[in-house]
Amino acid sequence: MATIQPSEGQLGDASAGSGAGAAGFGGGTLLALLANNLPQDHPSRSWLILLAPSATLAISWLWARLTSVVLAGLQHLRFRRDIRQLRRTLTAAIADEHHSDEYRGALRQQLQELTTLDIESQFNLLRRRR
């Protein structure tokens, strides 16, 4: 029997989805348990039991969305940190008089490319927010 191995990207997506599913399942189950602990004649009991599957779906969706937003934010913060660090490194190397003018010219070109990349990434971020 052949087995199918997920690619690395699919594996990351599956783990995020299973976390959302677990969160939703736990929230819906908690709501159902709460309803079952209420007296039989309590007016909210049947409503809580009926809402448990919807709560599972809502919590799963919310967890997946929240995870996606947080991971995108962390990726952006890492990118900004790397840009700052590289800018410091390039600026220090350009200022070092022990390097030849030709080498410092090449470093200035790299700094210019980094600045262009930084500006383009900020523009793209703003376009996505629109």
Image (tube, rainbow, N blue to C red):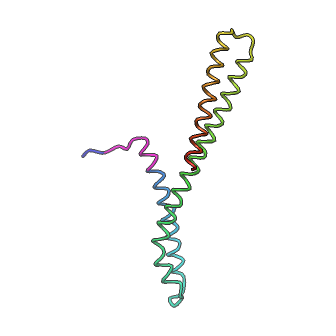
Residue placed farthest to the bottom in the image? 41
* Number of marks in picture: 0
The one of 71 and 127 positioned closer to us in this rendering: 127
Q: Residue 33, percent across and down?
A: 51, 75
Q: Residue 45, percent across and down?
A: 51, 83
Q: Is residue 86 left or right of residue 6?
A: right
The residue located at (68%, 22%) in the rendering is 90
Q: Is residue 111 left or right of residue 45?
A: right
The one of 113 and 35 positioned closer to us in this rendering: 113
Q: Is residue 8 magenta?
A: yes
Q: Quadrant of residue 78?
A: top right
Q: Is residue 95 magenta?
A: no
The one of 81 and 12 positioned closer to us in this rendering: 81
Q: Is residue 70 above or below residue 117?
A: below
The residue located at (62%, 33%) in the rendering is 118
Q: Residue 112, percent across and down?
A: 63, 24
Q: Residue 105, percent across and down?
A: 65, 14
User: Which stretch appears magenta?
Assistant: 4-13
Residue placed farthest to the left in the image? 1
